[in-house]
Amino acid sequence: MENVYNLKKYTKKILTKSFDIREGEFDRAFLMMLYIFLVISSNLILKPTVISLFISQFGVDQLPFAFILVAVFAAVGITLYSYSLKKPL
């Protein structure tokens, strides 16, 4: 039990110095780091799975078209979002 406490204390000390976390901000910063870690981990797991399902359904020849289609939709979405930010409420 004491080893777990020492590990937690040492981890907190390293993270506090590495990321310049001020006193009282550690809990919030740690939860944000955990959130980003989970988002990136799930992305790294899901992306190859989705691509393999797409290839098994449509074949490898259609994959470049899917990437282009995603890029076009992203560009349109970003453009519309950018215009919506410029208009006042």
Image (cartoon, grey):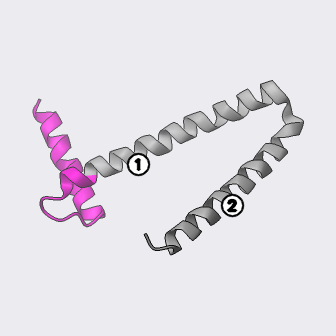
Residue 87 in the image, given as x and y percentages of width and height: 51, 73
- Of 86 and 5, the residue lying toward us: 86
In the rendered image, residue 53 lying in the magenta stretch gets the answer no
Q: Which residue is mark 1?
A: 36
Which region shows up in magenta? 1-29
Residue type at mark 1 is Ile
Left or right placement of residue 58 versus residue 41 in this view: right
Residue 88 in the image, given as x and y percentages of width and height: 45, 74
Residue type at mark 2 is Ala
The crowd level at tag 1 (other Cα within 10 Å; few <14, some 14-19, many 20+) is few
- At 86% from the left and 38% from the top, the residue drawn is 62
Q: Quadrant of residue 26?
A: bottom left
Q: How many marks?
A: 2
Residue 55 in the image, given as x and y percentages of width and height: 79, 30
Q: Which residue is mark 2?
A: 75
Q: Which residue in the rendered view is the most extreme toward the left?
A: 2
Q: Which mark is residue 13?
A: none
